[in-house]
Image (cartoon, rainbow, N blue to C red):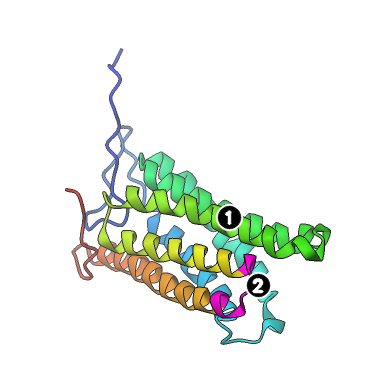
């Protein structure tokens, strides 16, 4: 019987390819998919939050939140468990669940909250995710600078939106929208770097590994 061993945690979106598992199967890196799903959905919603697109079109976010930001990112998180990457598994599964819960809230549950309590409820939801993102940022300091940048920008975005919603401050929500656009851009870069580096089998775009 083989002795138990602690699996090596692979920093997500690293320059080197994913190593084969002990059964000989070499999985593709699910990180770029998770980041891409997160980036695109965040970008679309943030365009509305920043006031760059009319709020009348905001329901377009719901489909992409469920399919790409939600289900695709959740699946990436499940695959990260298979690669032994605890950080990636927790991050992608959690944010996939965030987008599914966002879709469910807007579609089914928002109408059940009395109008006078809606702002506080949405603010609490966003601030709670800001707290989660903050401790994930500290964990990300052992991954890459590209990924860590995503997490610090995302934490800022959640807190700006949460405080803005709680206080019904349109200006603060718009600032949070701009922070969300920056977050999406950082996530897209991290995803693109991972895809291009994997495709060309060399470091074409830097991601700056941390804590090696």
**Measured along the vertical axis of the image, is residue 161 above or below residue 109?**
below
Q: At 56% from the left edge and 65% from the top edge, which residue is drawn? A: 163
Quick check: is 47 in the magenta stretch?
A: no
Total marks in image: 2
Distance (Cα) linking label 2 and label 1: 22 Å
Q: Which residue is denoted by mark 2 in the rendering?
A: 168
Q: At 40% from the left edge and 50% from the top edge, which residue is drawn? A: 136
Q: Quadrant of residue 26?
A: top left
Q: Is residue 203 left or right of residue 11?
A: left
Residue 181 x %, y %: 46, 76
- The 10 Å Cα crowd at callout 2, few under 14, some 14 to 19, many 20 or more, is some
Q: Is residue 79 left or right of residue 60?
A: left
Q: Which residue is denoted by mark 1 in the rendering?
A: 98
Q: Is residue 46 left or right of residue 206?
A: right
**Which residue is situated farthest in the top direction here?**
1
Q: Are marks 2 and 1 in contact (CB under 8 Å)?
A: no
Q: Nearer the viewer, residue 210 or 172?
A: 172
Whether residue 44 is visible here, answered yes or no, is no
What predominant SS class does the magenta segment belong to? helix
Q: Is residue 114 left or right of residue 153?
A: right
**Measured along the vertical axis of the image, is residue 159 above or below residue 211?**
below
Residue 68 x %, y %: 56, 63
- The 10 Å Cα crowd at callout 1, few under 14, some 14 to 19, many 20 or more, is many
- Check disc 1 and report its element: helix, strand or loop: helix
Q: Quadrant of residue 87?
A: top left
Residue 140 x %, y %: 32, 52
**Which residue is situated farthest in the front direction here?**
167
The magenta span reads 165-173
Quick check: is 169 in the magenta stretch?
A: yes
**Measured along the vertical axis of the image, is residue 4 above or below residue 72?**
above
**Pair 2/1: label in front:** 2
Which disc is residue 2 wearing?
Answer: none
């Amino acid at each position: 019987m083989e002795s138990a061993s602690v699996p090596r945690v692979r920093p997500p979106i690293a320059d080197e390819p994913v190593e084969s598992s002990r059964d000989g199967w070499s999985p593709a890196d699910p990180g770029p998919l998770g980041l891409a799903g997160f980036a695109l959905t965040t970008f679309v919603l943030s365009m509305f939050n920043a006031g760059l697109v009319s709020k009348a079109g905001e329901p377009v976010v719901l489909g992409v939140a469920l399919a790409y930001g939600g289900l695709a990112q959740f699946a990436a998180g499940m695959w990260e468990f298979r690669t032994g990457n605890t950080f990636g598994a927790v991050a992608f599964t959690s944010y996939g669940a965030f987008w599914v819960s966002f879709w469910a809230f807007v579609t089914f549950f928002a109408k059940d909250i009395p109008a006078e309590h809606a702002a506080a409820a949405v603010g609490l939801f966003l601030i709670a995710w800001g707290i989660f993102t903050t401790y994930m940022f500290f964990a990300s300091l052992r991954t890459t600078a590209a990924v860590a940048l995503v997490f610090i920008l995302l934490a800022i975005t959640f807190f700006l939106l949460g405080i803005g919603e709680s206080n019904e401050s349109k200006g603060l929500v718009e600032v949070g929208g701009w922070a969300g656009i920056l977050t999406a851009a950082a996530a897209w870069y991290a995803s693109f770097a991972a895809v291009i580096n994997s495709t060309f089998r060399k470091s074409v775009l830097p991601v700056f590994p941390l804590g090696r």
